[in-house]
Image (cartoon, rainbow, N blue to C red):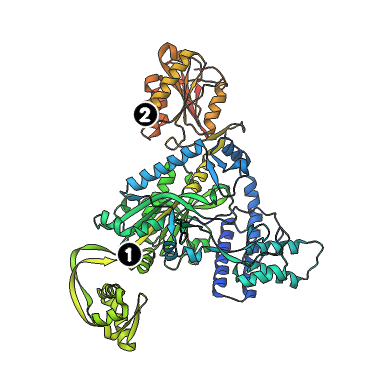
């Protein structure tokens, strides 16, 4: 979830000796697929403990493929019209996103949202809540950020959320040990004063390739004795030690209870499963949701909002019978087409496929209906908030990427200037999460489901020797007996236990040693009216910060012919301000009308920006465009005569004249998707307005035409007959 994404590297074109796996006319998609396949091979070799020579050869081939891809994409990158510098300058200048604690030098990985950024995030979250929580009747929770160690120990975060670190003993500054080793080898090989044979150079590169696989003692030896890496202070680095990426603290004044700021929101929903099930009247399936902060003490945060230390997540945990992952609303989305990048295509053609989600589930490209349903709903959500559909795709996790317990995983990736960035994870996590918390706490995390028709099942009928159980397990005897009784409900589950007891006289159940004398059994059958199971979890996990940043990029453009005029083309539903109200003069009568219109808009929950500055009208339009205001009302001298105003649409810059009393109704309808701008153009007369000048008087009989361009619809004088 929310794994870091690195910026695509733009390397100089180089002459390469083509390997047998590439051809000079290979397209970038096919080459990217070969890189994905080779990366998977390298990961598997490291996992299997293959000889360093074999790993080195595989890594060399991977580097060659990556360099070739970089050289092939330079021409395409040169054609990219997106002005990243202008975009970054505007985002900070208009306070969408700004560095935290800037006047004190700032802190890497921490950012503040200014007024428009805060409003945009709130609108995204509000749309998400309506689209998922309200529409799906989900059970929303707001769990604490502070999490006890035992919870994250059970989930695996305490043991596996680590990197090896070293410290400068003089300053206390921390560094990631494997990165120090890689940088030291780069510096050594780039030193023009040193000459290496090919064999010596290869030895150094082999060490560099395995930097993240060394043990702490091996890293210490390489840093201090082999490469003699010094800390910035000139002293030797400390011994390397595991650094957990979670923020650790203590709970209570005694300092004995360890806690962490949560790295994800999901655990709060898992541990509350039993109460949620009771609240839902024991009905299955159901979904729980949570919007909140996550914290990760990233070692080297970068790429703006894409890799930060504090971030907002929106997560759904859909609990379902592991033997029945159908979704009752799947039929509503089965025809929705998605761009899918399956694992076979990643390792083969490198091409995506556009396919209806119904077909993807039917052909088992996507594992089940519930997973497919949420993928389609996520696509619809992205389109609703204004993301460019042409820059969205779902990428399936490779087998080497997935956790051992996962059934299927698909990431929604959004293309931006940083490449394809994972913004939403969709994972079928099977029963893992509830099982580990159940085992750790000896608490049943089961659900039941009534059958339409009773059925006969084969089970084991148990009889316990309570005295022996009590002597062996004392207070835990009920835990042991419940575990055995749960297994006995299905003979297929209990049969391995029975066989082990018959053959060896003992067996392990949930960490307890059971002997043959403690329990007797016999095979039986019974008619059941309901089944009991530990639910599987289908989890869509949204990184709100990454979505917000991607939407900023997708919404940004510059007016044709004027690179100084930046525009954010936000959908009206998520735009930070829905309307600007501008007076054409500073007279008291005009300003009184402006205030009345703004008050009416705000009364109708339409956030409004009033600009009474003395700047030219065109300049004030441009200011509104930069923060994505979709509509602008101009109060002019004609308003004082007949109570009409002009309404400007941001992207086309076309304007109509309408009665002042219609403003709130019309803008509210467009913001909520109940009226289009085209309908407004058909209802009210167009007016000709110079962006930097006066409004021309135009009555309803004025002859005009609307011209469509790539940037929208513009009004033009009708040609003379």
Q: In this view, does 284 lie above or below 671?
A: below
- The kind of secondary structure element at disc 1 is loop
Where residue 655 appears, as percent x and y from the top left, is 47, 24
As rendered, which of 48 and 543 lies closer to the eye?
543
In the displayed orientation, state which residue is furthest to the front.
254
Question: Is any atom of residue 592 visible in this view?
Answer: yes
Look at the numbered discs 1 and 2 and tell me whether their residues touch, using CB distance below 8 Å: no
Where residue 22 appears, as percent x and y from the top left, is 62, 64
**Mark on residue 589?**
none
Residue at 58% x, 54% y is: 6
Report the residue marked by disc 1: 322
**Mark on residue 604?**
2
Question: How far is disc 1 from disc 2 in space, using C-alphas?
Answer: 46 Å
Instruction: Give residue 94's quadrant in the image.
Output: top right
Question: Is any atom of residue 202 visible in this view?
Answer: no
Q: Is residue 456 above or below residue 343?
A: below
* For residue 592, side relative to residue 478 (left or right): right
- The kind of secondary structure element at disc 2 is loop
Where residue 307 appears, as percent x and y from the top left, is 55, 52
Pointer 1 or 2: first along the chain: 1
In the displayed orientation, state which residue is furthest to the top.
641
């Amino acid at each position: 979830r929310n794994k870091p994404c690195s910026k695509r590297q733009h390397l100089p074109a180089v002459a390469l000796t083509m390997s047998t796996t590439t051809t000079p006319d290979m397209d970038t998609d096919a080459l990217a697929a070969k890189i994905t396949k080779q990366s998977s091979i390298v990961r598997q070799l490291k996992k299997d403990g293959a000889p360093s020579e074999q790993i080195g050869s595989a890594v060399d081939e991977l580097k060659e493929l990556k360099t070739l891809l970089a050289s092939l994409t330079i021409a395409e990158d040169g054609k990219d019209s997106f002005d990243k510098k202008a975009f970054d300058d505007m985002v900070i200048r208009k306070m969408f996103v700004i560095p935290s604690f800037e006047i004190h030098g700032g802190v890497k990985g921490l950012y503040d949202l200014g007024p428009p950024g805060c409003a945009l995030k709130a609108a995204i979250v509000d749309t998400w809540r309506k689209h998922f929580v309200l529409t799906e009747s989900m059970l929303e929770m707001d769990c604490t950020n502070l999490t006890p160690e035992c919870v994250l120990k059970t989930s695996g975060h305490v043991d596996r959320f680590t990197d090896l670190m070293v410290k400068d003993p003089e300053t206390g500054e921390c560094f990631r040990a494997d990165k120090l080793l890689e940088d030291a080898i780069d510096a050594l090989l780039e030193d023009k004063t040193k000459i290496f044979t090919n064999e010596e150079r290869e030895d150094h590169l082999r060490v560099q390739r395995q930097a993240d696989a060394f043990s702490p003692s091996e890293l210490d030896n390489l840093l201090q004795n082999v490469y003699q890496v010094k800390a910035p202070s000139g002293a030797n680095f400390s011994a390397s030690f595991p650094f957990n990426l979670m923020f650790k603290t203590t709970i209570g004044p005694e300092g004995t209870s360890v806690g962490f700021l949560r790295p994800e929101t999901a655990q709060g929903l898992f541990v509350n499963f039993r109460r949620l099930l009771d609240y839902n009247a024991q009905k299955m399936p159901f979904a729980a949701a949570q919007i909140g902060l996550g914290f990760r003490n990233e070692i080297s945060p970068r790429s703006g909002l894409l890799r930060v230390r504090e971030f907002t997540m929106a997560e759904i945990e859909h609990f379902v019978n592991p033997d029945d992952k159908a979704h009752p609303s799947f039929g509503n989305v089965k025809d929705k087409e998605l761009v899918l990048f399956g694992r076979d295509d990643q390792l083969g053609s490198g091409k995506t496929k556009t396919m209806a989600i119904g077909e993807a589930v039917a052909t088992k490209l996507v594992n089940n209906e519930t997973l497919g349903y949420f993928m389609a709903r996520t696509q619809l959500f992205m389109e609703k908030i204004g993301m460019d559909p042409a820059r969205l795709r779902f990428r399936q996790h490779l087998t080497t990427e997935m956790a051992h317990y996962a059934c299927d995983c698909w990431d929604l990736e959004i293309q931006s200037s940083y490449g394809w960035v994972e913004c939403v994870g969709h994972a079928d996590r099977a029963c893992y999460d509830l099982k580990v918390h159940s085992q750790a706490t000896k608490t049943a995390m089961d659900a039941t489901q009534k059958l339409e028709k009773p059925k006969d099942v084969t089970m084991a009928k148990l009889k316990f020797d309570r005295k022996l159980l009590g002597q062996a397990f004392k207070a835990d005897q009920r835990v042991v007996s419940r575990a055995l009784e749960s297994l006995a409900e299905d003979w297929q589950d209990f049969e391995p236990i029975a066989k082990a007891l018959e053959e060896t006289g003992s067996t392990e159940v949930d960490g307890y040693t059971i002997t043959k004398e403690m329990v007797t059994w016999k095979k039986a059958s019974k008619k059941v009216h309901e089944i009991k199971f530990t639910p599987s979890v289908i989890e869509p996990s949204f990184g709100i910060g990454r979505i917000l940043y991607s939407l900023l990029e997708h919404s940004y453009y510059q007016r044709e012919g004027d690179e100084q005029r930046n525009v954010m083309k936000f959908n009206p539903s998520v735009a930070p301000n829905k309307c600007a109200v501008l007076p054409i003069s500073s007279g008291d009568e005009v300003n009184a009308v402006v205030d009345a219109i703004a008050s009416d808009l705000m009364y109708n929950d339409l956030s409004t920006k009033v600009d009474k500055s003395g700047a030219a009208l065109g300049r004030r339009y441009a200011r509104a465009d930069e923060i994505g205001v979709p509509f602008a009302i101009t109060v002019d001298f004609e308003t004082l005569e007949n109570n009409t105003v002009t309404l400007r649409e941001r992207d086309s810059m076309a304007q109509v004249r309408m009665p002042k009393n219609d403003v709130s109704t019309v803008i509210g309808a467009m913001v909520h998707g109940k009226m289009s701008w085209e309908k407004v153009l058909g209802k009210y007369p167009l007016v000709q307005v110079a962006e930097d000048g006066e409004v021309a008087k135009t009555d309803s009989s004025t002859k005009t035409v609307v011209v469509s361009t790539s940037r929208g619809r513009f009004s033009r004088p009708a040609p003379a007959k």
